[in-house]
Amino acid sequence: MARDSRIEWTDHTFNPWWGCTKVSAACDHCYAEAWAKRLGFDIWSTGKPRRFLSDTYWEQPRKWNAAAVHAGRRERVFCASMADVFEWGRALTPWRHRLWQLVEETPNLDWLLLTKRPHLVRRLSPWVEDWPDNVWLGTTVESQRWVDKRLPHLSANPACVRFLSCEPLLEKIDIESWLEQGTIQWVIAGGESGPRARPSDPEWFYTIRDHCLDHKTPFHFKQWGDWAPTHAVPNALPRALLDDGTYSAPMGRFGKKLSGRLLDDDVWNGLPPT
């Protein structure tokens, strides 16, 4: 089946609803909020209504699952790019229950649940100690503060794959002890894009990549984002330049597309085995 998501590490994207409330610095320049506002939806922050999708939309994963069965392969579904499945809210309860049922009805789809609220997973998921084999659970860690706060909660859930999204990476982080323990089976890393994007130092990515290699953990470098080290884009002039010693290399603002996703002249597309 043709891939229908532009996100590099998934095949499909499914949103049980749209809307969320910001909880940490990674949310500051939220692309999902900007996209929703562009389409005229005022659905961000506490107290705002969420946008719910049609029954026809909810049938899509069943079609993906049937196609995956027919092709004899598995497909990955990122849930949710426009929300957080583990956001607290009474109005979300029936939609969450509907999602859990859908996940269990589509065993040839690997569901990637990425949250900034791992402390709520055990309260809001139905599986507790017996997670389905097709559910991967991840959390965002943009700084060491959130590594220390979120990973103990992530590790408490026995999903078959636990993963990290270090995007947008806003400072150097140390996740090596979690890799040593085997707590994390996959790491995604990337910089920030958009008009207010903050640069990510190349050394922050090299450190994560090297620790993943040391502990045989699949590593996926998604993007540089709007800013990239000038040596990574040798044939273009940046719109802006940062070269005051703050970063380990001169950083140029090239835009997401031009900056690309080469790290040390290579593409890192690591995925956990399924």
Image: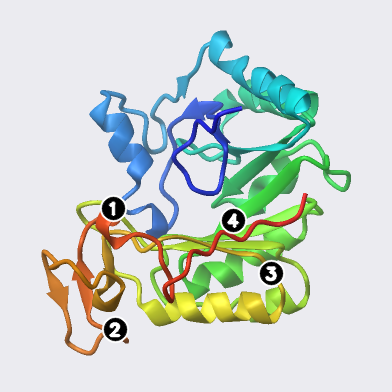
Separation of marks 1 and 4 at Cα, in angstroms: 25 Å
Q: Earlier in the sequence, mark 4 or mark 2?
A: 4
Q: Which residue lies under the disc numbered 4?
A: 139
Separation of marks 1 and 3 at Cα, in angstroms: 27 Å
Mark toward the viewer: 4 or 2: 2
Q: Which residue lies under the disc numbered 3?
A: 217
Q: Is residue 269 above or below residue 210?
A: above
Q: Front-most of 198 and 65?
A: 65
The quarter of the picture where the N terminus appears is top right
| Secondary structure under the numbered disc 3 in the rendered image | loop
| Secondary structure under the numbered disc 1 in the rendered image | helix
- Give, as a three-letter code, the residue at label 4: Thr
Q: Which residue lies under the disc numbered 2?
A: 247
**Discs 4, 3 touching: Cβ within 8 Å:** no
Q: Residues within 10 Å of mark 2 (few under 14, many from 20)?
A: some
| Secondary structure under the numbered disc 2 in the rendered image | loop
Q: Quadrant of residue 255?
A: bottom left
Q: Which residue lies under the disc numbered 1?
A: 257
Separation of marks 2 and 1 at Cα, in angstroms: 21 Å
Residue 163 lies, in percent from the top left, at 65, 58
Residue found 43% across the figure and 57% down from its top: 24
Q: Front-most of 236 and 177?
A: 236
**Discs 3, 2 touching: Cβ within 8 Å:** no
Q: Earlier in the sequence, mark 2 or mark 1?
A: 2
Q: Which residue, as the protein is rendered here, is positioned at the far right? A: 130
Q: Earlier in the sequence, mark 1 or mark 4?
A: 4
Q: Front-most of 122 and 181?
A: 181
Q: Earlier in the sequence, mark 3 or mark 2?
A: 3
Q: Is residue 219 above or below residue 104?
A: below
- Give, as a three-letter code, the residue at label 2: Tyr
